[in-house]
Image (spheres, grey):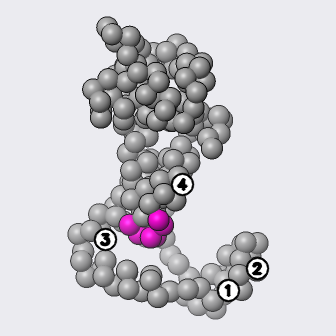
Amino acid sequence: MLSGKQTPARELSASHEHYLRAIWEVRSRRGYARLTDVARELGVAPPTLSVGLKSLEARGLVRHDDRRFLALTESGERIARQVHHRFAVIRAFLGDVLGIPAAGALNEACLMEHVVSDATTERLLDLLQLLRDDRQLRELFERRFAEYHRACRSAECSTCDLTCMSGSGPSLTPIGPA
């Protein structure tokens, strides 16, 4: 499910970011994080997680507490919280705005959290907050989006390069700073 590759803007691989987020989430829920609990959370075998944690320990992002439970250093927790923030915003956008069912939103947010930029995450959060704050806009959007279905021919959509959006209709202009 996760690519082990690093993204250009980030030093850590998606797997490593996922490990940090899982440790943070398990510790937040339980007050401690055993290797087996985190492995279960991630759906990986404990030996796989153990190998993956070695480089995070070497980077000073993960340590063991007095009881030998997994703990995050200050830097590790900062990264875990950032990843969790991107995940939560993307999951909310997919579910609340696009109407993706919960399981699909969860799975796709897990993939996207590692590649979306902080700037994009913040703009998605702005949109989510706007739709939550402006009841009239939210109701209009929900009604119109529920009824809307684009008119392109579906067989061509996967390869059309958005030609349907470059036709004779009004073009989309960027909102805010580019």
Mark 3 touches mark 1? (CB < 8 Å): no
178 in relation to 115, above or below: below
Q: Work out how far the residue at label 3 is from the one at label 1, CA to CA, in angstroms.
A: 28 Å
**Residue 138 highlighted magenta (yes or no):** no
Rendered location of residue 57, percent (x, y): 49, 15
Would you say 13 lies left or right of 71 here? Answer: right
What is the three-letter code of the residue carrying label 2? Glu
- Residue 72 horizontal/vertical position (percent): 38, 22
- Residue 54, x across and y down, in percent: 55, 15
| Residue 68 occupies quadrant | top left
Q: Which type of secondary structure does the marked residue at label 1 adopt?
A: loop
Crowd band around label 3 with a 10 angstrom C-alpha radius: few (<14), some (14–19), many (20+): some
Q: Which residues are magenta?
A: 96-101
Q: Are marks 4 and 3 in contact (CB under 8 Å)?
A: no
Q: Which residue is mark 2?
A: 156
Compute the Cα span from label 4 to label 3.
21 Å
Q: What residue sits right under mark 1 in the picture?
A: 152
User: How far apart are the alpha carbons under marks 4 and 1?
Assistant: 25 Å
Nearer the camera: disc 2 or disc 4: 4
Q: Which mark is residue 131?
A: 3
Q: Residue at x 44, y 70 (%)?
A: 99
Which residue is at the far bottom? 168
Which label belongs to residue 108? 4
> 10 Å neighbourhood of mark 1: few (<14), some, or many (≥20)?
few
In front: label 4 or label 1: 4
- Which tag, 4 or 3, sits closer to the chain's start? 4
